Image: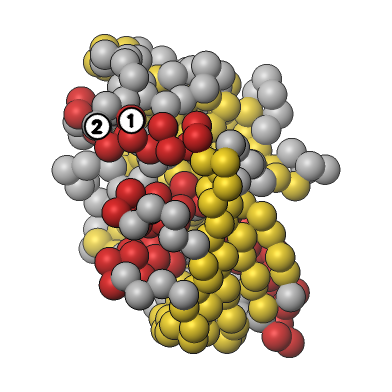
Amino acid sequence: MLLILLSFSSGLGWAAQRTLIPKVWNGELMEADEGGIYVQSVLADLGARSRNGSFNFVLQGRRRQLQYVFQTNASGLKESPQTVWKIKEDDYDLIAITLVDEQGLKWDWKGPYRHGFKVQGKSLSYFGVWYLVQIAQGHQLKILAKPGTNVFKDEQSQGAFQSIIEASTGRELKTLTEKAAVGKQELRHVIRSTQTIGMFYKLNLFKQNAYAEGMSQIIQANDPDIRSCYTDYIERVPDSQGQVAYTFVYSSVTKSIKSLKVKQTDFRDGRFLECLNLKLMGLDFNIGSSLIGELTFSFQLGQG
């Protein structure tokens, strides 16, 4: 059984390899040496037929030598970014992509890509549109990264970013107004400054606990997104604490949790429980074996 403490400031990495899973940006203000990134992606076969699937991509920093592994879905050209991540400021090389398509087949691309990508402190880097094409021979991918039209809306920034830049060139696409977050985000800042919001979890995969580390890394990387359910809840029901225990079934075909049931809970708030359910069911894992497990969250409050 694996017990891990998740905190607002914690980061996860394999120190020996300097490899990190980036945190999902959840509206919080950025540190001076970190920037946001987002990418649009299109997956197709050689016949130009659109495909669905999830993929990992790896960025390697040139100066800091940090390596980040991202997980996302082939998103198409949506009106707003599917996910914004935050990582350290640097110039990055795209060095690998691994894709699992809608049939559960794996496809690979090895880099580095022909040009790098710039991430600038307190700015949002738009990585453009990535066209991922499946090549039948050897289950290989081809990638073409092209500049696209920025779809990040000004109001989404919440004052976290100074500008939006084109990652391939460093060219500024738009200047944004950097300011302290307002409204609900400001309230959350007050909560964080006066209370310690502790979120612990226990993960038990029974005979397949060898996969627990990989699964826990994804949960921790999405810590702000999961924790936001509790932050919302205590704004409505102050000082509420307790546990939520789940049983779940993970599918290696969809790379996600396909069944999630509450085993026991101290919370009777349907909105809170639904929020947690949606966050967990929406996570993408890259574990090669289907499995069953138990996951228990413990939410605690303390004075900061």
- Which residue is most to the right? 16
Whether residue 175 is situated above or below residue 26 in the rendered picture: above
Q: Which residue is drawn at 38% across and 53% down?
A: 238
Q: Which amino acid does label 2 sit on?
A: Gly
The N terminus appears in which quarter of the rendering?
bottom right
Depth check: give the residue in front, 272 or 219.
272
Residue sitting at x 57%, y 73%: 296
Q: Residue 23 versus residue 159: which sits nearer the camera? A: 159
Residue 129's quadrant in the figure?
A: top left
The residue drawn where x is 38% and y is 38% is 188
SS of the residue at dot 2?
loop
Q: Looking at the picture, does residue 145 appear above or below residue 119?
A: below
Q: Who is closer to the viewer here, 266 or 168?
A: 266
Marks 1/2 in contact by CB < 8 Å: the verdict is yes
Residue 94: which disc? none
- Taking depth in this image into account, of 270 and 175 the one nearest to the observer is 270
> Residue 26: where, in percent of width, then height?
39, 41
Q: Answer above or below: position of 233 versus 176.
A: below
Q: Is mark 1 on a helix, strand or loop?
A: helix
- Which residue is denoted by mark 1 in the rendering? 186
The residue at the point 57 percent across, 41 percent down is 303
Q: How is the image coloured?
A: secondary structure
Task: Write down the residue under mark 2.
Answer: 183
